Amino acid sequence: MTTTSEQALSPEDIARFGEDPGRSFAANLARVQDRIHAASRQSGRAADSVRLLPVTKTVPAHVLRLAHAAGVHDFGENKLQEARDKQAALSDLAIRWCIIGHLQTNKVKYLVRFAAEFHALDSIRLAEALNRRLDQEGRDLDVYVQVNTSGEDSKFGLAPDALLPFVERLPDYPRLRPKGLMTLAVFSSDHERVRTCFRLLRDLRDKAVAVHPEIAQLSMGMSGDYELAIEEGADVVRVGQAIFGPRPTNDAFYWPGFAPEGSG
Ligand SMILES: *Cc1c(COP(=O)(O)O)cnc(C)c1O
């Protein structure tokens, strides 16, 4: 047996993921899939109409090997540097790398080398930079346009009223294949406030699709709210902690200024 690609689990890994991470990931995946199917059926949708995009951020590459073996083949990563490091460590595996976090224009060249999807397109400047690089590499990229549906400063994304003018300009960037819209709902235990964000994205999609027929999918819903998102029409849910367990990092790292409700 070759062990070059296998790294033993450290005590920290075991404390975080258990003795047999592959097995618990598989069990968690099955549970999340069941809940996705149930939520789909409940809202009168086909059981397989919603795609689960597992979010692998903060899970170390050697642990992700076990996730891959357990059936996770699409990896959602928020930070480009982390995704690049993991891609280099896991380049022997067939993985679809999906970048779901805000991207700086100067990082575009790294993204187009390996990413299969980008869920955080939020400016014309970025569209232009991506298109130029993709053209140089001779490839296209699936993209979702991120909208700030909660109105919070801590969230990235276009303001809702900026979306349609933005969508009208997308044909100028033919290397981008627009797939839909993406959002993060407000982090709240008030379901109505969460649903309001998802409904806003759906309404915007219904308008955008009239301008650009490919903008059909809704990428919305995370561990805490994916069932609500499915009831409101999600096509892609991005789920991390419900599969891989709680993260050791504070989410302020991903959403500047983010403070959980009740923490102030
Ligand atoms: C981390 C992250 C998720 C998943 O969050 P969980 O709470 O782990 O399910 C979804 N979308 C984006 C953009 C993220 O950064």
Image (cartoon, rainbow, N blue to C red):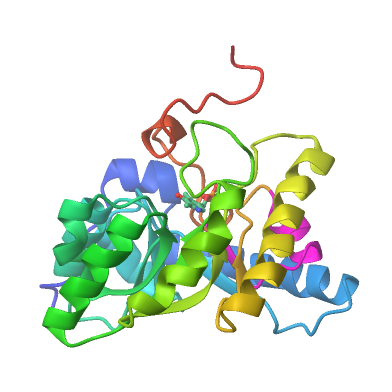
Considering the image in quadrants, where does the N terminus appear? Answer: bottom left
Task: Tell me what residue is drawn at x 51 percent, y 31 percent.
Answer: 153
Q: Whole-percent x and y of residue 80?
A: 25, 55
Q: Whole-percent x and y of residue 15?
A: 40, 41
Q: Is residue 22 left or right of residue 188?
A: left
Q: Is residue 113 visible?
A: no
Corner quadrant of residue 217: bottom right
Task: Tell me what residue is drawn at x 81 percent, y 68 percent.
Answer: 39
Tell which of 53 and 229 is nearer to you. Answer: 229
Query: Is 26 placed above or below 195 here?
Result: below
Query: Is 241 placed above or below 32 here?
Result: above
Asked if the magenta segment contains residue 236, the reply would be yes
Query: Is 244 placed above or below 170 here?
Result: above
Task: Tell me what residue is drawn at x 80 percent, y 74 percent.
Answer: 40
Tell which of 121 and 253 is nearer to you. Answer: 121
| Count of numbered marks | 0
Q: Whole-percent x and y of residue 27?
A: 59, 67
Asked if the magenta segment contains residue 237, the reply would be yes
Q: Is residue 60 visible?
A: yes
Tell which of 212 and 178 is nearer to you. Answer: 212
Task: Tell me what residue is drawn at x 22 percent, y 58 percent.
Answer: 8
Q: Is residue 255 left or right of residue 191?
A: left
Q: Whole-percent x and y of residue 174?
A: 33, 82
Tell which of 215 and 192 is nearer to you. Answer: 215
Corner quadrant of residue 96: bottom left
Which segment is the magenta one?
A: 225-239
